[in-house]
Image (cartoon, helix red, strand yellow):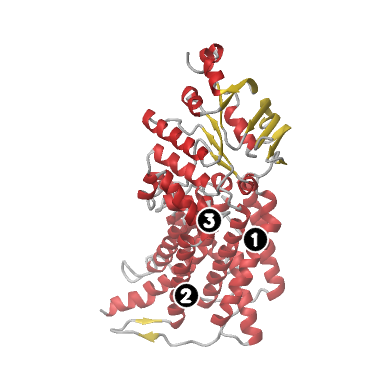
Amino acid sequence: MALLEAKGMVGGYGGMDILNGVDLAVDAHEVVVIIGANGAGKSTAMKALFGLVALRAGQVSLGGKDITNAAPNDLVALGMGFVPQERNVFRTMTVRENLEMGAFLKPAAQTRVMEQVFGLFPVLKEKADQPAGELSGGQRQMVAVGRALMTEPKLLMLDEPTAGLSPLMMEQIFERIVAINKEGIGILLVEQNARQALAVAHRGYVLATGRNRFTGTAEALLGNPEIGQSFLGG
Amino acid sequence: MEALADFVNLYFLPGVAVGCIYALGAVGISLIFAILRFAHFAHGDVMTFGAYVAYSLVASLGWSVYLALPIAIIAAAFLGVAVDRLAYKPFRKSPGIIVVIASFGVMLVVRSLIQLIWGVDVLNYETGIRKPIELFGGFRIAQKHIIIILVSVIIAAGLHWFLSRSRMGKAMRAMSDDADLARISGIDTERVVRWTWLIGGGLAAAAGVFAGINSKLHPSVGWDLLLPLFAAAILGGIGKPYGAIVGGLAIGIAQEVATYPWIADMPLVPPAYKNAVAFFVMVCMLIWRPTGLFRGRVL
């Protein structure tokens, strides 16, 4: 059984359905990417998994436990980490304090896990006492990922982690994501930079108008000419 | 030299003491706004409640009011948590204005209960006059002012430690920064809310007791201070506890110093119109710098 499994997700904001039946699954050892055009429901699907968008129908389970419409802070306790696309750091707090807030549920492990995060993102150690709002976009993204790692999640979900970053920084972030996955953490990504994301992913889902359009291994999706034309920019 | 001593003894030091009272009250208003995003209009009546709890201990057990202070702080802290549970929590997801109206209701209920329990007469913690303490070169300070200022400094230092060092204090800052992200990080936001009321209520009780010590105790002692408290919170930048401390001191000192006969022999502002100074500052800030000195939020 998959670590995270979602079946037939239907829901959206204020009565308007954006998801019209989406299935997703992520295994513990996998990097899975969700791609699709703007408005296809990628981010909404991820938020629904994390209890931030109410589902009218469908089911989500984590490790076999039903978590449909559970509250975000309970999901963190169950081993899910989420990095939103925007507003993903506490801007007025230092980098170290941001990481401490990530460890709110697991204060005992704080020092040890923070060292691991500093190992993964050495630049954060240098900037530990700077307010996160003063960092560059790429460094802020590292803080956000680091914050989510502080609870030692089994599954890390990232909503467009490379949006607005330079190609060099994008490469670094993808490389770190692979490194995190090697530690045995399942990764679910929503990505606009689909080709680069599929290059590091095991499997991918292509969504269109709130439904699954294609599902397959990263190689199969990259090799599919129809997907190449519509979703990977030719 | 004598004129300077008079200015310091009769205007500036009393202003600092009043400023401390405002600061203690305004910090609670600012913290509550930072966490729950609404203006808590019942804050003055939480102050009054604390002041009357202390009075009961003074009157029935013969305690010193300073000994009664910690008990009053604890009582008002729990009043804050209870009021939140009963009157504000049901509206957590409603538009802010609904909670503001609820706080008007709480204000009336708390004040009526105070009048029912303790009556409507003007009371004093102690009768008689204490001689001020002579310092050097003609400077004098009233004993009550020394204690008000010292205890306020200790409370402010404790608050600073709490917000900058403790886990719950940092979680409070995190929630004030971005409540959604705090929830996503796994922070139990309802626990943060409870702590906010404990601290806001406790500080309000200290402000209320000090207001009673500084002048007299009556059922609208806190309500009468609500205007300068909001002026202080807005001056400091609403949602910024350190700003509220600075704003409280500034308003308190400005109110007292404004009654000094700066021009001719008359007070510049007649003492009965002291509150107008706070109102003036508040209106100016709202027009020209609504985020306050410390870049808070807009009310």
Residue under circle 3?
Answer: A109
Please tell me which residue lies in front, B286 or B233.
B233
Residue under circle 2?
Answer: B151
- Residue A47: image quadrant is top right
- Residue B192: image quadrant is bottom right
Drawn side of residue B204 relative to residue B103, left or right: left
Instruction: Report the residue at 55% width, 86% height from top.
Output: B127
Q: Are both tags, 1 and 2, on one chain?
A: yes
The mark that comes first in sequence, 1 or 2, is 1
Q: Secondary structure at mark 1?
A: helix
Q: Are marks 1 and 2 in contact (CB under 8 Å)?
A: no
Can you tell which mark lies on residue A49? Answer: none
Q: Nearer the viewer, mark 3 or mark 1?
A: 3
Residue type marked 1: Met
Mark 3, chain letter? A
Mark 2, chain letter? B
Is residue A149 shown to the viewer in this render?
A: yes
Distance of label 1 from label 2 (alpha carbons):
27 Å
Provide residue A54's location: percent of width, then percent of height.
Answer: 68, 36
Mark 1, chain letter? B
